[in-house]
Image (spheres, helix red, strand yellow):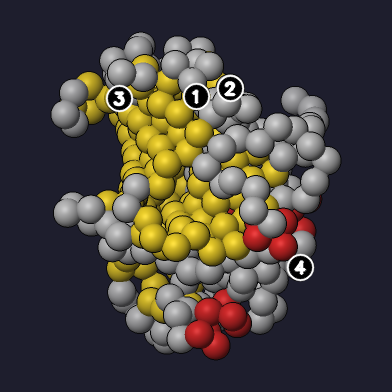
Amino acid sequence: ADGPATGTRALDLRVLGGIDLRLLPDRGLDLGGAWYGGLPLHWLSAVGEIRPLSEPRDEDWASAFGGGLVTTCGLRNVGAPSEGHGLHGAYSHQRARVVSTERVQDDGPALRVRGVVREGAALGPTLEVQRTWTTWLGRGRVRLADVTTNLGATPEPAPLLYHVNVGPALWAPGSSLVVARHGRTLARDPEAAAGEPWDEAPHPTVAPERVWEHELTPDADGLGTVVVRSHARGLTLTLRWDATTLPRVHQWVHPAPGVYALGLEPANCSVLGRAHDRAEGRLPVLEPGERRHTSLEITVEPDR
């Protein structure tokens, strides 16, 4: 009725013994809040839930970044503003058409939501995402599956990054992080390169954000895996994703009091913008009519 999210939609899913979800159809059907046994898994910024911007440009994305457990970055730029596209692109400011909400049987009883999101212009390139969320009854498991299609007549750059934001209920001093089967860890900025451990939650301090990229090798099933262990809560959060279509993973840590966040970011691109990836010969492109399948799964369970 009032406030910065006036006029937008939210869809709440409740599952006994599972992960409750708050989906935001007017923010690309991204995942805002998520709770396991009443415990909030997500990180929220001071902005909170807010209506989408009509034409995000330059650094506008940051001013409307409410956080949430999963924020989608893309579909035409990820990272620094580049080639006329703003920070992290415009996907999370597109309004979804919700196709269905239903109870299903999929390896057990579950709730499922399907939606369609389009980003494009009447006479320009258009990318479409068919999005599916599933959360299961009786277990801490939620899954996102996307199919992105180039509906245009020409090849179109289509970088994509899922910003998985873990909140202070799990990411706090004493918590640890494991990136499975990873090789080098590359620092994006001087703060990340200063030697502060990336695999331990820092003590709150007034300092800038830090970003790393972890080079990894997928497992036999083509999956990448990152694990957050909250020793204080006795819980483990595991993020798995299809590393055949999302071969890169970045990590964002902001240690400042009042912010204090962890971002786990499976991606098919860098966080330096599409011009940088184009110059490196690594810019993801979808051909006309081409479809790309991407997925991730988040599970939460007590430590064993």
Using the image as rendered, state which of residue 282 and residue 290 is in the foreground.
282
Q: Is residue 143 above or below residue 40?
A: below
Amino acid marked by disc 4: Asp
Query: How far apart in space, not on screen, are marks 2 and 3 (Cα)?
Result: 21 Å
Residue at the disc numbered 3: 136
Earlier in the chain: of badge 2 and badge 3, it is 3
| Callout 4: SS | loop
On the rendered image, what quadrant is the C terminus found in? Answer: top left
Query: How far apart in space, not on screen, are marks 1 and 3 (Cα)?
Result: 22 Å
| Callout 3: SS | strand
Tell me residue 219's x, y (percent): 23, 53
- Which label belongs to residue 169? 2
Query: How far apart in space, not on screen, are marks 4 and 3 (Cα)?
Result: 39 Å
Q: Is residue 2 above or below residue 279?
A: above
Using the image as rendered, state which of residue 243 and residue 26 is in the foreground.
243
The residue under the point 58% across, 22% down is 169
Using the image as rendered, state which of residue 105 and residue 121 is in the foreground.
105
Earlier in the chain: of badge 1 and badge 4, it is 4
Amino acid marked by disc 2: Ala
Amino acid marked by disc 1: Ser
Earlier in the chain: of badge 2 and badge 4, it is 4
